[in-house]
Amino acid sequence: MNFVFDIDGTICFTGKNIEEEICSALDECLDKGHEVIFASARPIRDLLPVLPKRYHHVKMVGGNGAFTFKNGKIEVIYFKQEIVIALKKLIESYQLKYLADSDWDYSFTGEEDHTIFKNLDPHKTAMNKPLEGLNGISKMVIFSPPAEVKQALHKMPVSLFEHHSEELIDISPLGIDKQKGLQQLGITEFIAFGNDANDKQLFQDAKHSICVGNHPVSVYANEIVNRENVAKKIKELAKRYVNEESVYSCNN
């Protein structure tokens, strides 16, 4: 079985690393023959540093689906040029603060004390370039967008994920989400662990879904667990689905 894990707030609670208890559960999952896939809003550049090196070979979805990572290779989906022009116009008109990601480099104009900046390019392998200097734009975050900007964005052919607690809005190319990223990797059946609005489609399409914490998106999940029970739940499902798959194989 494929086990798909969101990162921040699901299996990583510091923004920097994954607790050893959860890593042990992930190892047990792999040892039982399951495949582990990480699916995050982070681009691959910022996803890899959070993961212990023993997981750097696994498949990943980044940027809410704009990035896929397989066999050490990153594939990227970019905004169409007319969308880039429209986003730049909004930024200039309203003097917006933003983070724009390209294939590896980025453009950031937000506050340096923001959580996103603290987790941005931790290994300092990329460059913070002017927006015009990026090869293309695969994902954009707008900080503290006013109502007029939100209305304009909702009229544009893009995918949006609004994070009210952080006062930001995630923008991806139209039709791009974590589920589409999984499809790009050839993954159709999976167990999903998540905790935020960008995990909604994963929860709806998963064979079984778990929300970590009682968040609004939890209404789409099969069950809710708290942070302290994540490792236990991973081990429980890893064992359950080995048994179910063994029964299925015997019957066929």
Image: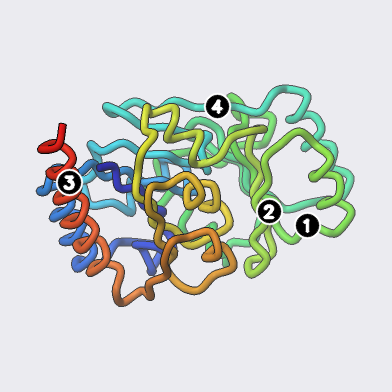
Mark 1 highlights which residue? 145
Q: Is residue 174 above or below residue 10?
A: above
Q: Secondary structure at mark 4?
A: loop
Q: Give the mark nearest the N terminus, 1 or 3.
A: 3
Q: CA distance from mark 4 to mark 1?
A: 24 Å
Q: Nearer the viewer, residue 3 or 107?
A: 3
Q: CA distance from mark 1 to mark 2?
A: 7 Å
State left or right for residue 137 relative to residue 72: right
Q: Residue drawn 38% across and 75% down? A: 226
Q: Give the mark nearest the N terminus, 3 or 2.
A: 3
Q: Please state which amino acid type lies under the numbered disc 3.
A: Arg
Q: Secondary structure at mark 1?
A: loop
Q: Secondary structure at mark 2?
A: strand
Q: Please state which amino acid type lies under the numbered disc 1.
A: Pro
Q: Give the mark nearest the N terminus, 4 or 1.
A: 4
Q: Give the mark nearest the N terminus, 4 or 3.
A: 3
Mark 3 highlights which residue? 54
Residue 111 place in picture, x, y as percent: 64, 61
Q: Residue drawn 45% across and 41% down? A: 62
State left or right for residue 97 relative to residue 6: right
The quadrant of the rendering that contains the C terminus is: top left
Q: Is residue 103 above or below residue 126?
A: above
Mark 4 highlights which residue? 77
Q: Please state which amino acid type lies under the numbered disc 4.
A: Ile
